[in-house]
Image: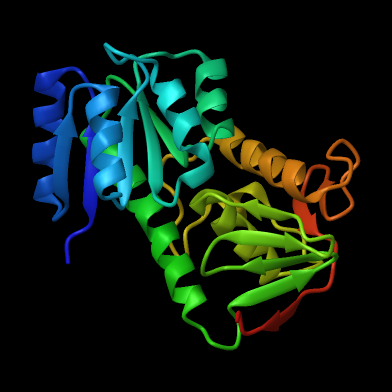
């Protein structure tokens, strides 16, 4: 079955270009010119991936991301003409998996779309592993199948796919320092267009959810000049 991609972009010509490009690579693409129409389509049926422009005629794309934040269970790429780093980082902090700045090279968009979808597929494959579908570390249990963290105190935190994929990499290599390059990689393939701040932003998001004091992390620690490490033992079990 083809992966379904929604593109929310008010430029009709750009929508046509993006749609034709992604369909050439075997994706099913639906386009929407307003945030309202995109939101309605998502509520009817969620896509595998959403590509959303920040400058929409009826709303700021960041507002749409904020609205989707708590329920996002699909890939999310910000498409923007804004070159400011603050806008890119804000999009990532709100839950986007990645961003593409206009004008963009066609192969860059295809590569980023492919990287985000691979992360989702890896999570699905991991969740199907009956013996390793739940990882426990510290006071947290990570259920890969539904992308949730449950604390011993009963608190539940939802993860985006990008956060889940990152945490899964840590859980599979506890007490090992992982470099940004390793964390940026997708399986055997590295992202051809790495954004060096994206990993730092995702680490920050995870820390806000699992650390007692994100400013003094005890679970995901920084090893300066080397990368990050999950400084806890991990035990695996079957999610029930």
Q: Position of residue 170 (x, y in %)?
A: 69, 62
Q: Which residue shows up at 22% across the image and 28% down it? A: 37
- 113 sits left or right of 11 in the view: right
Q: Nearer the viewer, residue 150 or 237?
A: 150
Q: Quadrant of residue 142?
A: bottom right
- 208 sits left or right of 183 in the view: right
Q: Quadrant of residue 76?
A: top left
**Looking at the image, residue 95 lies above or below residue 100:** below
Q: Position of residue 215 (x, y in %)?
A: 87, 35
Q: Which residue shows up at 71% across the image and 39% down it? A: 204
Quarter in which the N terminus is drawn: bottom left
Q: Position of residue 172 (x, y in %)?
A: 66, 72
Q: Position of residue 46 (x, y in %)?
A: 30, 49
Q: Nearer the viewer, residue 67 or 100?
A: 67
Q: Nearer the viewer, residue 34 or 114?
A: 34
Q: Which residue shows up at 15% across the image and 23% down it? A: 14
Q: Quadrant of residue 202?
A: top right
């Amino acid at each position: 079955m083809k992966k379904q991609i929604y593109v929310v972009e008010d430029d009709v010509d750009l929508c046509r270009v993006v749609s034709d490009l992604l369909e050439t690579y075997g994706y099913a693409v639906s386009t929407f010119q307003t945030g309202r129409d995109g939101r309605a389509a998502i509520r009817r049926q969620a896509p595998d991936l959403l590509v959303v422009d920040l400058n929409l005629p009826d709303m700021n794309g960041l507002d749409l991301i904020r609205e989707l934040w708590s329920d996002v269970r699909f890939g999310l790429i910000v498409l923007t003409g804004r070159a400011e780093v603050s806008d890119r980082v804000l999009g990532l902090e709100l839950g986007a998996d990645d961003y593409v700045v206009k004008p963009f090279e066609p192969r860059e968009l295809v590569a980023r779309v492919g990287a985000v979808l691979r992360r989702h597929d890896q999570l699905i494959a991991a969740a199907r592993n009956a013996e390793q579908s739940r990882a426990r570390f510290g006071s947290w249990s990570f259920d890969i199948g539904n992308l949730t963290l449950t604390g011993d105190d009963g608190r539940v935190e939802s993860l985006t796919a990008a956060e889940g994929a990152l945490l899964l990499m840590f859980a599979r290599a506890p007490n090992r320092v992982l470099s940004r390059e390793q964390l940026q990689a997708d399986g055997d393939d590295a992202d051809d267009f790495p954004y060096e701040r994206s990993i730092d932003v995702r680490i920050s998001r995870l820390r806000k959810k699992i650390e007692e004091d994100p400013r003094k992390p005890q679970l995901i620690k920084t090893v300066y000049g080397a990368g990050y490490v999950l400084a806890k033992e991990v035990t695996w079990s079957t999610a029930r």
